[in-house]
Image: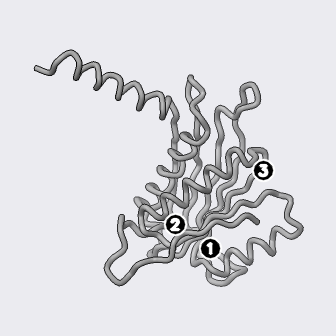
Amino acid sequence: MPSVSSLHVLLNLFLLTALSTGCAKVVIDSSRHPGFQQVLEPVAFVIYERNTGPDYTEPLRAALLEQLAMHGIRGTAHIITGGEFDADASMKSIAESASGVILIVPTGGTSYYGALQQIRYEVDAFQMSSSEDGSKVWHARVDTGSGGYGVQNRNRLALFAQRLVDRLITDRILPGRSTPAPGQEKQPATLTRQ
């Protein structure tokens, strides 16, 4: 039988874990084009800032890059702020170096005292046949919520990135491996801000 002090330590660890992740939730409903038979790599994630701001897009970009590195997937992550002189030219430049582009667009949510408690996203994956032409191969609606205790943005966005990449792997849009095969080491994921 465990001692009282070991139970106390386990209880503290449980509470610390619960508080660090809070009651954050991420619900993803996705569909894959039935005719798509490949995986997208290298991939470029493009996050539209819209009404969320850098407090949300920067941690999301960092978390996506961490997930790509963890799974050994070559990729980049970009933020489109809306202030670009020519957003189409930015997208064309991003697409030139990727076989797939995944667009993450915030579409709504709720706020409480200036913090976004819930953010809804539309996420689309495109297979690029040229820098100007892509075919949609996957679509998802994502609902993220911080829960009743207003979990920190970074934790919620890290959970969103983890679940999104996991779903893209499960749906066979991204390659599923935790480490690159011998001789197949990938270039590290890179950061850019458009």
Is there CB contact under 8 Å for labels 2 and 3? no
Work out whether mark 1 precedes mark 2 in sequence or the reverse, and give the earlier one: 2
Name the element at disc 1: strand
Q: Position of residue 138 (x, y in %)?
A: 55, 63
Q: Depth check: give the residue in front, 8 or 190.
A: 8
Q: Depth check: give the residue in front, 181 or 118.
A: 181
For the residue carrying disc 1, how many other residues have a C-alpha within 10 Å: few (<14), some (14-19), or many (20+)?
Answer: some
Q: Is residue 97 toward the left or the right of residue 93 in the image?
A: left
Residue depicted at x 65% and y 56%: 104
> Which residue was labeled with disc 1?
135
> Which residue was labeled with disc 2?
33
Q: How many labels does the image show?
A: 3
Report, in whole angstroms, how far the alpha carbon at label 1 lies from the one at label 2: 10 Å
Name the element at disc 3: loop
For the residue carrying disc 2, how many other residues have a C-alpha within 10 Å: few (<14), some (14-19), or many (20+)?
Answer: few
Work out whether mark 3 precedes mark 1 in sequence or the reverse, and give the earlier one: 3
Is there CB contact under 8 Å for labels 1 and 2? yes
Which amino acid lies under the numbered mark 2 shown in the image of this protein?
His
Is there CB contact under 8 Å for labels 3 and 1? no
Name the element at disc 2: loop
Position of the C terminus, as image quadrant, is bottom right
Residue depicted at x 86% and y 70%: 86
The correct choice, above or below, for 81 with respect to 194 in the image is above
> Which residue was labeled with disc 3?
50
Q: Is residue 188 toward the left or the right of residue 122 in the image?
A: left
The single residue placed furthest to the left in the displayed view is 1
Q: Depth check: give the residue in front, 97 or 174.
A: 97
Q: In which quarter of the image is residue 149?
A: top right
Residue depicted at x 49% and y 63%: 68
The correct choice, above or below, for 113 with respect to 51 in the image is above
Mark toward the viewer: 3 or 1: 3
